[in-house]
Amino acid sequence: MMTDQCWLITIQPAIDIIREFELTANEALIELSDQDAPQRIVKIRRDYNTWVANETLEDYALRFTPHSFRKWSIFRVANTALGAISFLVLEVIGAALAVNFGFVNAFWAILTISLIIFLTSLPISYYAAKYGLDMDLLTRGAGFGYIGSTISSFVYATFTFILFALEAVIMAYALSMYIDLPLYVWYLISAIIIIPLVTHGVTLISRIQMITQPVWIFLMVLPFVFILMKDPDAVRGVMQFAGASGFDADFNIYMFGMAIAIGMALIPQVGEQVDFLRFMPEKTEENRLRWHLGVILAGPGWIFIGMIKMFAGVLLAYLVLQAGESVEAAVNPTHMYHLAFDYVFSNADVLLAVTVFFVVLSQIKINITNAYAGSLAWSNFFVTFDPQPSGSCRVAAV
């Protein structure tokens, strides 16, 4: 027995050399049999390795975000995450609730929805920011397991695609009002222009949100200041709004429940907040207060701004109907803000230009977030079927 072991130890180096020679020979035969294929594969791998080496393209999909990459300030990360709340579907939801169920039912439903979303988003946001985890890793750590996290990634990825499509439709409709082209052309343009903005990951997205945030906030607040100045009775009027039917002035538990069911579609939005909160710098004794404030505001706190935007949609829907417009116009954000900016600008051309600019700016801000978050979620989902880490760049490009 000892002799066999000694003999095996003696010839093991020779066996290793032979195996290495066989692998080299096999590779040479493959290259000789098809010279084009190896060159094409090498080219693709070289490009992919270049993308991976470029930190502006790195998104740390499928793994936790290292502390070395979490180099931005708390304010910048929080500002990037809050850039996602520009989406005008919030106003559409608020308007739809008020038009269909009346102000009273919409009011209590929006408050309830906001409270539920805040409470459920708080622990998710905290642990994502603390440990640098995305939604897939969070669901695995929460006990969903590998298959469970894959299913949750699919649900979340579907949400981002649906929201992307809705926001692109809103953007396309606004552009069609300014330049007369078929809507399907604007649909295509509204989707394609987003792709180059997300291929460089959170680095470029952060810059875009930082530059556009002050302009967006100014244009968001401006019309409501003029509405309150020129029509102070509008608030009193909307509180008595009984819906499009005129019979929904009182609280109704069934309408309240239906309104909550509609608004709860917003709950997966915390996933998009998490995709940026994972870049939050490490919490220390010096930044502890600012860190917690940034996580709360940019994590579960997004719904407070979202709640204000839903109430803004309620007010604008009421004003649109009071102006004699149709119910369809009352739940169309372009028409809603066209009427809102009418309180600010008297020139029709300036009014239309500012309205379209505001809508397009809002939709670009949210759809770069939707595309980025969706690419991460689809990467996490498809890696189940393709063991090679694909990263989000290929999914976003597809």
Image (cartoon, rainbow, N blue to C red):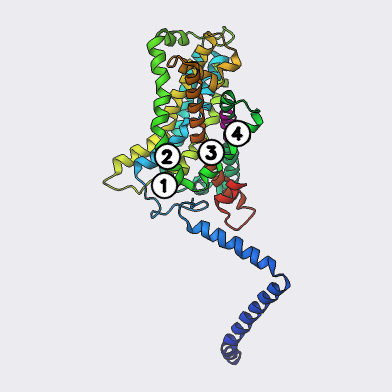
Instruction: Give the main secondary structure of the magenta stretch.
Output: helix
- Few, some or many residues within 10 Å of mark 3 (<14, 14–19, 20+): many
Q: Earlier in the sequence, mark 1 or mark 4?
A: 4
CA gap between label 1 and label 2 equals: 10 Å
| Labels 3 & 4 near each other (Cβ < 8 A) | no
Q: Amino acid at mark 2?
A: Thr
| Labels 1 & 2 near each other (Cβ < 8 A) | yes
Q: Is residue 72 visible?
A: yes
Q: Which mark is residue 370?
A: 3
Q: Percent x, y for residue 171?
A: 56, 29
Residue 158, image quadrant: top right
Q: Percent x, y for residue 260?
A: 54, 23
Task: Tell me the residue at 63%/82% (across/down).
Answer: 21
Q: Percent x, y for residue 192?
A: 59, 40
Q: Is residue 292 magenta?
A: no
Which residue position holds label 2? 80
Which residue position holds label 4? 165
Q: Amino acid at mark 1?
A: Phe
Q: Which residues are magenta?
A: 164-171
16 over 103 or under it: above or below: below
Q: Percent x, y for residue 36?
A: 69, 67
Name the residue furthest left: 286
164 over 14 or under it: above or below: above
CA gap between label 1 and label 4 equals: 27 Å
Front residue of 368/14: it is 368
Front residue of 201/179: it is 179
Q: Which mark is residue 279?
A: 1
227 over 27 or under it: above or below: above
